[in-house]
Every structure is written in structure tokens, then in C-alpha cells.
Amino acid sequence: MAVANQKGGVAKTTTVASLGAAFAELGLRPLLVDLDPQACLTFSLGIDPDAVEVSVHEVLTGAATAAEALLEADDGVDVLPAAIDLAGTEAVLLPRPGREYVLRTVLEPVAGRYDVVLLDCSPSLGVLTLNALTAADELLVPLQAEMLSHRGVGQLLDTVADVQRILNRDLVVRGLLPTMFDGRTVHARAVLADVQERYGLPVLSPPIPKSVRFAEAPAVGRSILRTSRGSKGAEAYRAVAAGLVQAWGLQPHDPAAAAEQARR
Ligand code: ADP
Ligand code: MG
């Protein structure tokens, strides 16, 4: 599942890290792929991007295999890490034929090891994001539930339509995920209703509440599910993950954890 929105700061990376940890809690095996040259996902999983020797750049440009780049992170997830050299990847791919299919091709040999693969996109609709949309079965669009923040959604959906026509017929938009949601404000709720109506997309629930706890987690290399286990934000991501697992018909490997989540 690609997690994309060309707007920055809408919680794409937070969503990938948190859902990954939630899937791991359920006993599933998640792989998280960092496709942003800023390498925030890699960093927030406790890995120093400057110390990464084989990154997604080498994998996408053919210098290494995905298996050679995989790292194990603390939250029970594997990661295909990014480093700063990812900033140059698009330029390398640009003249290549089939450049949008590279990620799909390189992930194929390792994808079978995992129950779910999450792709953390950069804030652009460039070649790397097109690679993510081509490799993915589904797209999740985090959306900050604040006025004006949905303006780019139409453009993103135009790109998705192009991808579905040309590159990946089977791409499904799983839905919008409201993030940094402050249900007390009338406009947060109004924006949600407006977006839902305007674009005719499913809105996943529950919305992810706004909380300062989220800012603290990346610095210690852990997701909020570990740093603030019982917080509303952690619980919201667990509930979204459980909904996805159910929608996909996946069998959690840890029935006790699954029952515990259902109970909450
Ligand atoms: P993106 O990947 O879309 O650029 P990030 O996941 O990096 O967005 O999040 C941007 C900032 O917002 C980060 O500082 C993150 O800690 C913070 N953040 C994410 N989710 C929430 C939330 N639910 N409440 C408050 N702050 C959040
Ligand atoms: Mg990000």
C-alpha cells in the first residue's frame, strides 16, 4: 500500500511508521519502504540515514538487490532505508525505459516474505511516487483535517487516474485518512464532510487525533505505539490497522494480540 500525498507534513511518514508497528503487534510481518530523500521514515525507525550503506537508491538503480538493503528496525518491522543519495535517483531513472516499473520489479523477490508492504512517498508526484503507485495494490491518502489542506487531492487523484490507465490498472484507492484531527473544531469536521462528498472517496476511521506525543516519537527511533502505548493516537492507528487487516482478509499470526485489539 502506497501512502502518498504531494503535500508535505500531512503525516505520511508517521502513518507508515505507526501502521507498521500496529501490524507487527498483530503478529504480521510488515516491510516499510522509505521513498523520501529526506529519509524521515528511516530516521524515525532508529536508523541513521548517514550510516546506511546500501539504500533504496542502490536498489532502484540496480547496484544492489532489495534483499541486500533490508534492515531490521526496533518496532518489529523491516525497512528498506533511504539515504540522502535518493535525491539523485529520479535523475538516474529518468532516461530509462520502464522507469515507473523499477520499484515493482525490485520488490518482487522479497515481497513474498511479508504480509504487508507500506511505501512512504515523498511530497511530490515525481518518478519515485509514480513508482510507488505502480508497485502498489492500494493507495492511502493521509489528509490533514484543516482548511485548504485538501486542495492537492484533486491533482493527486488525476495522477492516480493516469496511473490506472497506463501503468497499474489494479490500483485501488483505499481511502483518505484524516490526520491531526481536532474533532472539537467545527471546520475540521466540515472539511472532512466536504472532501468526502467532493471526491467520493472512502474516509477511513477513526481519524487520527492531533497530539504532541507524535512529535516526540521519531527522536527516539520508535513509533508512538511504543513511546506512548496507551495514547489516543496509538489506539487510533491500531484501530485503522485492524480495519485494514480485516478489509484485506489477512489472518493475524498472533490471535491473542488480535483479540486484544478487537476488545479495545
Ligand atoms: P509527512 O511525511 O506527510 O511530511 P510527517 O509524518 O513527517 O508528515 O509529519 C509531519 C509532522 O507532524 C511531524 O513533526 C509529526 O511528528 C507531526 N505529526 C504527525 N501526526 C501528528 C498528529 N496526529 N498530531 C500532531 N502532530 C503530528
Ligand atoms: Mg514524510
Image (cartoon, helix red, strand yellow):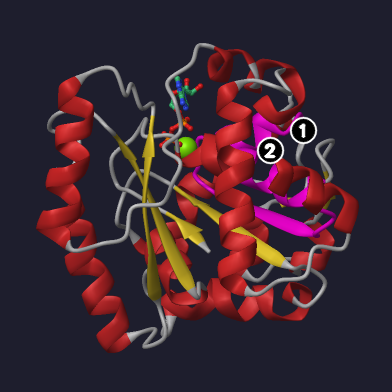
Give the mark toward the camera: 2 or 1.
2
Q: Nearer the viewer, residue 224 or 242?
A: 242
Asked if the magenta segment contains residue 27, the reply would be: yes
Mark 1 Cα within 10 Å, few/some/many (few <14, many 20+)? Answer: few
Residue 163 placement: quadrant: bottom left
**For the residue labelled by badge 1, is the local secondary structure a helix, a strand or a loop?**
helix
Residue 234 locus on image (x, y percent): 63, 30
Residue 218 locus on image (x, y percent): 64, 22
Tag 1 residue? 51
Tag 2 residue? 264
Asked if the magenta segment contains residue 130, the reply would be: no
Q: Nearer the viewer, residue 195 or 61?
A: 195
Verify CB contact (< 8 Å) between mark 2 and mark 1: no
**Residue located 63% across and 20% down the image:** 231
Tell me the CA gap for discs 2 and 1: 39 Å
Residue 121 locus on image (x, y percent): 46, 51
Q: Nearer the viewer, residue 94 or 217?
A: 217
The residue type indicated by label 2 comes to: Arg
Residue 60's label in the rendered image is none
Residue 191 placement: quadrant: top left
| Residue span colored magenta | 17-46
Q: Earlier in the sequence, mark 2 or mark 1?
A: 1
Q: Residue furthest front?
A: 263
